Image (tube, helix red, strand yellow):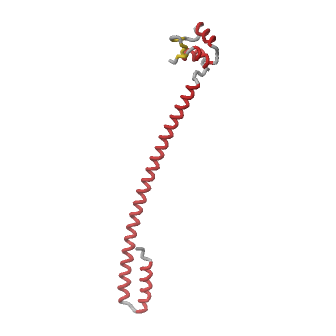
């Protein structure tokens, strides 16, 4: 229960102190230890706004703080979600990289084996065929990614 002085109650209601005193005397407003209670003011003036300017500022600050906390939590949730997506993407890219490394090793081995086979065929073929094999060998050597 919030208690207001007669002057405070009059200011917040926008009426004179005299009117407040009259309402206290006729029993419309109740007092407690010499102060008017906000409960009795609300009963007598249900449409009144008892919040002072300072109370309204405090309420506004509290709302701003609640919004900031909410935004902070939302921002953290988004950050965590983005971080998870990033880690999942990195994991996927690592797996793809390992596959590509394995393919690279395989194709290097194929190039080496092909080069050896061409040399072996060159040694045992006619001179006409040798010319084509030499060109093929050069093509393989020039295009071997090492």
- Seen at 41% across and 56% down, the residue is 91
- Seen at 44% across and 46% down, the residue is 80
Measuring from the top left, give residue 122's x and y in whole percent: 38, 87
Residue situated in front as seen by the camera: 51 or 40 = 51
Determine the residue located farthest toward the top in the rendered image: 25
Measuring from the top left, give residue 14's x and y in whole percent: 64, 18
Q: Does 98 sit left or right of 30 as displayed?
A: left
Q: Does 56 sit left or right of 134 as displayed?
A: right
Q: Quadrant of the C terminus?
A: bottom left
Measuring from the top left, give residue 29's x and y in whole percent: 57, 11
- Vertical comparison of 26 with 131: above or below: above
- Seen at 56% across and 26% down, the residue is 54
- Vertical comparison of 54 with 18: above or below: below
Measuring from the top left, give residue 18's x and y in whole percent: 63, 11
Determine the residue located farthest toward the bottom in the rendered image: 127
> Total label count?
0
Quadrant of the image occupied by residue 5: top right
- Seen at 35% across and 85% down, the residue is 120
- Vertical comparison of 100 with 84: above or below: below
Q: Does 91 sit left or right of 39 as displayed?
A: left
């Amino acid at each position: 229960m919030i208690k207001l002085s007669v002057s405070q109650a009059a200011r917040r209601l926008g009426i004179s102190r005299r009117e407040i005193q009259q309402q206290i005397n006729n029993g419309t407003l109740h007092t407690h230890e010499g102060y008017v209670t906000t409960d009795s003011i609300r009963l007598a003036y249900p449409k009144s706004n008892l919040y002072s300017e300072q109370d309204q500022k405090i309420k506004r600050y509290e709302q701003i703080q609640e919004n900031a906390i909410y935004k902070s939590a939302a921002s953290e949730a988004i950050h965590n979600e983005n971080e998870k997506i990033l880690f999942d993407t990195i994991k996927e890219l690592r797996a793809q990289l390992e596959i590509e490394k394995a393919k690279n090793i395989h194709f290097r081995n194929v190039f080496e084996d092909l080069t050896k086979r061409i040399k072996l065929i060159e040694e045992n073929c006619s001179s006409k065929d040798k010319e084509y094999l030499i060109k093929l060998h050069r093509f393989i050597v020039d295009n071997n990614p090492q």
